[in-house]
Image (spheres, rainbow, N blue to C red):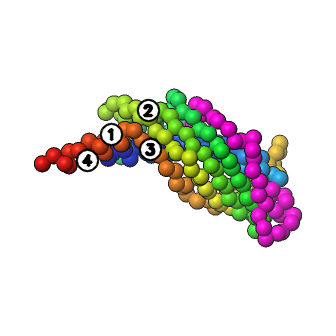
Amino acid sequence: MIARTRARAAYRAIAALALASIVLASIVLASTVLTSQALASGADEPATLELSYLNGVYRDLDANLQPIRQGGIVILVSSPEHRLEVHGNRLSFRANGDGTVDAEMEVDFEGGGELIADVQGIGRFTDRVVAARQTARAAGTVRLAHAEGGYELTVVDAEPSTELRIRSQLADQVVGVCEAAALIP
């Protein structure tokens, strides 16, 4: 169960970072246009945009993962081979009237890859993980301001996490062994 939890946490980190990289690039680009439209219009309806050029297949993204520290245990996580396919995305912005904008994004994606966890003092675990097609959602409030050379996007308030469904081959094996052991008298 510990391996299952760590594998899920590690892959969630990889998937979230890859997704965040794609989404952050799209938010910065789209927010420039949409924020000015939303602020200027003052409309009740949100400005909505799909950045179709972000849809596609991404392979072996550099997630730059930081070590996971759990008590005295340090876990170094990497994913030397993975694939993320973005099927669609939607960004919506609504002006609040105080210079901030409520933003919501949805990304329809699927993917999978190899996950390696080097657990200090214990050893290396390799797993194959899959994220079936799903839609991740995140919402928050941002402030966009002109800055030298472009714009500065400040997150004022955001959800602390988003749910991702991930299937782990290693976790399935561990659960299968535990279930089989429970059947033996």
* Residue 173 marker: 1
Residue 156 seen anywhere in this rendered image of the structure: no
Which residues lie in the magenta part? 34-63
N-terminal label among 3 and 2: 2
Q: Quick check: marks 1 and 2 in contact, CB under 8 Å?
A: no
N-terminal label among 1 and 2: 2
N-terminal label among 1 and 4: 1
Residue at label 2? 116
Q: Residue at x 23, y 44 (%)?
A: 180
Residue 124 image-quadrant placement: top left
Q: CA–CA distance between discs 1 and 4?
A: 10 Å
Residue 95 image-quadrant placement: bottom right
The three-letter amino acid code for the residue at tag 2 is Ile
Q: Residue at x 68, y 61 (%)?
A: 141
Q: Residue at x 80, y 56 (%)?
A: 34
* Residue 167 marker: 3
Q: In this view, which residue lies farthest toward the right?
A: 40
Give the left or right position of residue 21, taking residue 167 as reference. Answer: right
| Marks 3, 2: nearer the viewer | 3
Identify the element where label 2 is drawn.
strand
On the image, the x and y values in percent for residue 65 come to 52, 37
